Amino acid sequence: MRDAGGATLLVVDDEPDMRSLLEDIFTAERFRVVSVADGADAPAAYRREQPAVVLLDLVMPRVGGMETLQELRQLDSSACVIILTAFVEIPKAVQAMRLGAYDYLTKPFVKDELVLTVQRALEHRGLVARVAELENLSGPVASLRALMGPSAAVTRVVASALEGAAASGHVTIEGEPGTGKELIARTIHQQSARRDRPFVTLDCGAVAEANVESELFGYEKGAIPGAERSREGQLQRADGGTLFLDEIAALPAPIQSRLLRALRERKVQPLGGSRAVPVDVRVLAASRASLEHEVRAGRLRQDLASLLSESTVSVPPLRERREDIMALANRFAEEMAMERGRPVRGISESAWQLLLAHAWPGNARELRDVIRRAVLRCEDVVEPDHLWPRGRRADAPASRHAPGGLSLRELAELGAAEAEQQAIREALRASRGNKSAAARLLKTDYKTLHVKMRQYAITGEDFRPA
C-alpha cells in the first residue's frame, strides 16, 4: 500500500471532536491534515491546499455534503472524495456515487477500514495521473477504461496491463466470466512490441475435448478423419504475435503437457507431421480463478502455471466496482436506446438501488443483457420492474411476463432469451453439469451451448454434484 509521504488530506466536518479525531488518526499516518468546519469553506480550502483526498461529512448546517461534493467535482473532475455520515441512507449513497464520490463510509467507522480506504484513494489518485499520461500516448488504453469503467479498480487493472505489455513474457489474466479479460488481452497486445503481428484467440472451454489438440497444434493432410488438406493450428497462426487462451484450465492434461513443451522449445509439431515447426508466440492465458487455485484443484499443471505467470493481471468482479456498475449501466442504456430508437431519460433511484445491490455473477456481460432488456420494456425511465419483471429477485428464474408497449418482434426477442436460459439450466441440471451431454439434450453443438452459457452467465459447476 502506498505511503502517505506528507500527502494533504482535507477534512470537512462540522463536529470539532470528529475533526480532531481524524486529524490525530491521519497525522499519525504521515498525512498533512487540513480541516474546515463547513461545506461552504471547502471549495476555497481545496483550491488553496490541492489535497490528494477529501473526507466529507454528509450532514452539515449551512452547505451539506452533497452540494459540496458537486462543487469539488466541478473544481476538479479527478477530486478523490470519501463521504462520511452517521446516517445509513441508501438513496443518498447512490446519489453520492453518481456524483463521483470515491467511496461512502458510515460513522462510527472502524479506524483500520477508514485508513485503508483513504490509502486506496491516495493510490488511485496516483494511478489516475499515471494512466492519464499514458493515454496521451495510446488510444487503446483510453478505450479500455471507457469500456470497463472509471473506477479505481479499473485504473489498477490498466496499470497492470501496461506493465504486462511492456514486458516480453507470458501473462495471466485472472477474473470471473464477463469481466473483460479479452479486452485486456487485446490492449496488452496492442501496447506490446508484437502489435503489428497476429492476435489469435482460442476459447479452450468452447472446443470439444476431441478437437482441442488439432485446433491448437494443427494437422497434416490425412492425419485425422476428414482432413483432406493440412491446416495450421492456432500456435502457428499466432507466430510472431500473441495467442490468447481463454479458460486455460479447461485444456485436458495431455494437451497441457504438449503446450508446455511447445512453449519451452518454441516448436510445434502438427498431428501427423514428421517435423517440428519453429514458432515465436507470446501467450496471454485467462482464467476465472487464480492459476494457483487451478493447480490445487488438479485442473492445471504446476509447471505450465509457473511458465504462464511471468506477469499477472487480476480483474475484480463488477460487484466490487460500484462506480463501474453505474457508468456501464448508463452506457448500455444509451446504446440500446439509440439502437432501438427508444428515447430513455435515465434509470430511477429505486432501480439503481437494485443494480448496486445485485451480485452480478455474470459481471458486465450480465449487466449489459439486463439493461438492454430493461430498455425494451420501459417507456421513459428504467424502473425496478423493467430490470426483473413482476418484482422477481435478480437471481430467481426468468419470468414469462410480456410487458406492454413492445412490438411483436421485441416481445419475441425477450421471450426467446428467457426460454433459452430456462432450457439451458434444465439441460445442465439433467446432465449434472456435463456440457457435452447438455448440448446433446438441447440438440445443438458444444460451442453454441458454451457461447450461450457465457452470454447468460451460466456455469456448469453450479449443476455438478458436490
Image: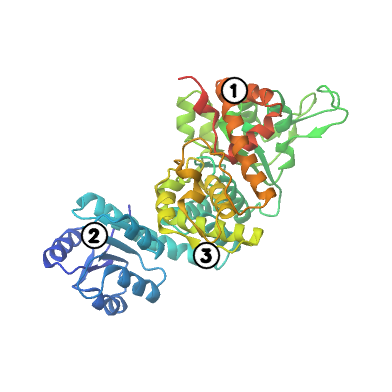
> Quick one: SS at disc 3?
loop
Please say if the residues under marks 2 and 3 sit with CB atoms less than 8 Å apart.
Answer: no
| Quadrant in the picture for residue 400 | top right
Residue 193 locus on image (x, y percent): 63, 54
| Quadrant in the picture for residue 101 | bottom left
Residue 268 visible at all: no
Q: Tell which circle, 2 or 3, labels the residue nearer the N-terminal end.
A: 2
Residue 449 visible at all: yes
Outermost residue on the left side: it is 17
Q: How is the image coloured?
A: rainbow
Marks 3/1: CA distance? 44 Å
What residue sits 52% from the left and 54% below the top?
A: 148
Marks 1/2: CA distance? 49 Å
| Quadrant in the picture for residue 24 | bottom left
Outermost residue on the right side: it is 228
Q: Tell which circle, 1 or 2, labels the residue nearer the N-terminal end.
A: 2
Residue 142 locus on image (x, y percent): 55, 62
To which residue does mark 3 refer?
A: 345
Amino acid under disc 1: Asn
Q: Tell which circle, 3 or 1, labels the residue nearer the N-terminal end.
A: 3
Residue 434 badge: 1
> Quick one: SS at disc 1?
loop
Residue 142 badge: none
Judge depth for marks 2 and 3 and give the one in front. Answer: 3
With respect to residue 265, does 18 lie above or below? below
To which residue does mark 2 refer?
A: 85
Classify residue 259 as left or right of residue 55: right
Amino acid under disc 3: Arg
Marks 2/3: CA distance? 30 Å
Amino acid under disc 2: Thr
Classify residue 122 as left or right of residue 414: left
Closer to the camera, 26 or 280? 26
